[in-house]
Amino acid sequence: MPSTQGSDAYERYVLDNEDGFTDEFRERLDVDARSLPDALAASEAAGRVPVVAEIKPTSPTTDCERTDDPVALAERMVDGGAAALSVLTEPDHFGGSTETLAAVRAAVDVPVLRKDFVVRESQLDAVAADVVLLIVRFLDEPGTDDLADLVAAARERGFQVLVETHTAEEVERALAAGAEIIGVNNRDLAALSVDLGTFERVAPTVPENVTLIAESGIGTENDVVRMREAGADALLVGSAVMDGDVRENTRRLAAATAATETTTEDTT
């Protein structure tokens, strides 16, 4: 049975957005996806921390609101060293749109994640992306599709799938569904509280052959180092990139581990 908190979050973020549940015919997508694991590996090889920088015009968890051209923001993030981008397409709570994602993906050459509350197969055909997000927490709810079925349906269309978890039990479910890329969200979607210890507790349950991404609450270089030391292959960062100069913020976080190692070596 889904928890009451899970149901509250589901109602807040998913049921509010009726457009996401349309059953009208959409042409089935056939996506030629850019490889997210390859992009993360290329960032590592270039001496950068793999950062998935997020274009998030607004959020229930921040006062920051950006009205800049999202394509210009995306280009500056990539210029700052982002290995990949995440684009919100949920309009009501995060100010996103499928049109924004399409424009961003056409303008950059890195993988682009569609960040939304996808709970039915029909939603997959709304817009092409390289990676689609599926949140385990929301796929217990009545009327949602089965996680494994959604993973398979996404892959049939050419998408890579980032399966988001918050607990060790959700990691088990993600693995059972065939997840190859798993995110651990440090934010509790019901309470909206953030605890970086969440990733540290959950990460050991993820096999080494699975790409592991730390999500939410990462704002400083020390946070980057902490998540990397706990096993993160990459970091998904939204507010800390969007709040200010997105190029410089991305560059600073992508260089965090290298800067820390240099400082350590200089003092030994």
Image (cartoon, grey):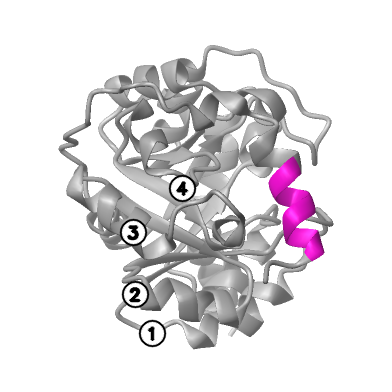
Task: Decide: few, some or many residues near mark 4? Use Cα within 10 Å; few <14, some 14-19, many ≥20.
Answer: many
From the viewer's perspective, is the residue at label 1 or at label 3 nearer?
A: 3
Position of 44 relative to 12 (above/below): below
Of the residues under marks 3 and 4, which one precedes in the sequence? 4
Q: Please name the residue that numbered disc 1 is placed on.
A: 207
Q: Secondary structure at mark 4?
A: strand
Q: Is residue 33 left or right of residue 122?
A: left
Q: CA distance from mark 4 to mark 1?
A: 21 Å
Of the residues under marks 1 and 3, which one precedes in the sequence? 3
- Name the residue nearer the viewer: 107 or 223: 107
- Amino acid type for the residue under numbered disc 1: Pro
Q: Position of residue 36 (x, y in %)?
A: 29, 52
Q: Is residue 79 left or right of residue 60?
A: left
Q: Please name the residue that numbered disc 4 is placed on.
A: 52
Evaluate if marks 2 and 1 touch, with contact meaning CB atoms under 8 Å apart: yes
Does residue 49 appear in this view?
no
